[in-house]
Amino acid sequence: MDSTTFVAFLSSILFTIGALGVLLRRSALLIFMSVELMLNAANLAFVAFAHRWAQLDGQIFVFFVMAVAAAEVAVGLALIVTIFRTKRSTNVDDLAALKG
Amino acid sequence: MNPDLPVLIVLGAVSVASALGLLLSRNAIYAALFLVLNFGVGAVIYLVLNAPFIAVVQVSVYAGAIMVLFLFVIMLLGAERLSPGENPPGMSFQRPLAIALGGVLLGLALYVLFVRQPPTTATALADSSPMAVGLSLFGPYLFPFEVVSILLLVAMVGAVVLTRNR
Amino acid sequence: MPVLLEATLKSVVLIFVLLTGFAYLTLTERKVLARLQARIGPNRAGPLGLLQPVADGLKLIFKESITPAGVDKPIYFLAPVLVAVPAIIVFAVIPVGKGPAFQLASEINVGALYIVGVMGVAVYGITLAGWASNNKYAALGGLRASAQVISYELGMGLSIVAVVLMASSASLADIVEAQMPGNILGWFIFRQPVAAAIFAITAMAELARAPFDLVEAEQELTAGFMTEYSGMKFALFFMGEYVKMIAVSALFATFFLGGWSGPFVDQAPILSVVYFTIKVVACLLLMIWTRATLPRMRYDRLMGFGWKVLTPVAIANVIVTAFLIALGVPGYQ
């Protein structure tokens, strides 16, 4: 097995664990961290394929994904802090105020 | 035999273990630390894959900035204790369904990667120095680069507006 | 294998030098502070007090190592290690002398970025120590530390960007070479004075040393994040802080004071190590002097200064530097 195949394999496992985290955990913080794990898994795949095809473009994409992740974290954590101030909780099930 | 493979197997094992730690942890601080470990291992994998620039950016952006922010928020809110994962009220089928869907996702990913595998052309990346990355960023990828910078600006303004004391 | 053996040997020597340097830095700091405050300082252990660090070390080893009730054990024990390790691994990319014999990995083309990354990771130890100690003073100290380091990291990174622009390389070996041509005016402290000032200020803030030592302000927070630590765990924190002092001094010398360059290094390469050591010691003495001179800042002023003054000035400096280089102004090609 060459490095690229192995890392692609690892990337799919990590992506699945991240997706499970999003689906199974109830804390907004944990869901958010799981999303970061999924983004990171995608990054691993990008770099692995950049390695196989000897192209830099995969690494450039990782760079952009990191920038988007940073932006997402800034806004997302601000939202969590604001919600925590009113609800005293980070549990997504408590955010049911609009439920009919 | 690929000389990098033993290193990658060890790194992969640590990486999967830390991801599972994140998934199963009862304490948000531990979850964040497992994620930091995962990102650190990711950086080493990037080094093995001949991407040193991405590796150090990974450490300084993810481990040095994003996860410190997570830890800071968890400590500030005092929200480290988490309830164990449970079905949301009125949805007793949610967890089994989620696990089944996760299995389907993994199966599909592995199918695409390994059954429909593209032809292998194992060539080494000649040059992935910061200079090559920079020339690419400010050359063919200049427009996406500018868009990302505006995105960061918008996110910054958004974060300030959201957390402002009124 | 010879490569690995050589790297291991160099690392062992480096760590030995750093530990000795740390021990005598504590003594120097106490002596110099005492002189600046018209006292004599430690002079009982050995001639001129030269054995004082040994006595301190022995005392700390034989102290009872207390683990308070209610701490989060794994993180409580991990935190001191997380403080000490980043402080040491920064040195991997710093060229301490001319030629490969005195350099470990200073050729790597992402050296400056590596430093930014390691400096960013260094905050974990302090933050986690504060959280794991189950003590309100420690928790406040940990929170202050993470906020302070996040705020000042930005200015430090941007000042390093200016240096990288000047040298048109992120390798520390190349950064030293770029300051060599001509005379002493080639040093980046003369060509990048704003970046040098910002680096010096942010470095002291990253170290959480006076006047930025709100993290462990004893009047308000007892000893901040270190309150619940004793014995060897406390010694590790102490070591981490002083080794980091040496590290940022070495970085300042490399980035702005021409690194190991100096007269006659081509004839006698060993001189380069001497020059580098002299520059590092000068920076260390300046830091001790600052501590003795300036009072502690207020917390809101600290944050305001970091975000409203240092960061904009650092961004402006990067832009101006880029323009000067693009226009080909003499000294900035």
Image (tube, rainbow, N blue to C red):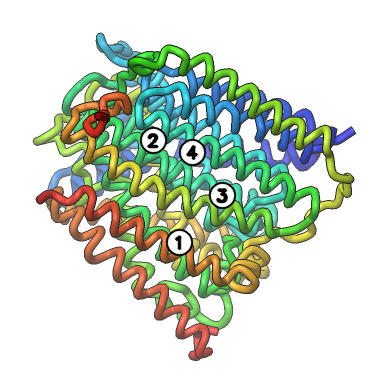
Is residue C225 placed above or below A66 in the rendered structure?
Answer: above
Give the residue at x 33% y 64%: C198
Per the model, the C-alpha gap separating discs 2 and 3 is 17 Å
Where does residue C11 sit, x and y in percent of width and height?
Answer: 61, 39
Under circle 1, the secondary element is: helix
Q: On what subunit does the disc labeled 2 rest? A: C
Residue receiving disc 2: C124
Under circle 4, the secondary element is: helix
Position of C324 with respect to C132 (left or right) is right
Mark closer to the observer (3, 4): 4
Per the model, the C-alpha gap separating discs 2 and 1 is 26 Å
Per the model, the C-alpha gap separating discs 3 and 1 is 23 Å
Give the residue at x 47% y 48%: A69
- The amino acid type, in three-letter code, at marker 2 is Tyr
Is residue B88 placed above or below C138 in the rendered structure?
Answer: above
Q: On what subunit does the disc labeled 3 rest? A: B
Q: Are marks 2 and 3 in contact (CB under 8 Å)?
A: no
Q: Are marks 3 and 4 in contact (CB under 8 Å)?
A: no
Per the model, the C-alpha gap separating discs 4 and 2 is 19 Å
Can marks 4 and 1 be said to lie on one chain?
no
Q: Residues within 10 Å of mark 4 (few under 14, many from 20)?
A: many
Q: Residues within 10 Å of mark 2 (few under 14, many from 20)?
A: many
Residue receiving disc 3: B56
Quarter of the rendering occupied by the N terminus of chain A: top right
- The amino acid type, in three-letter code, at marker 4 is Glu
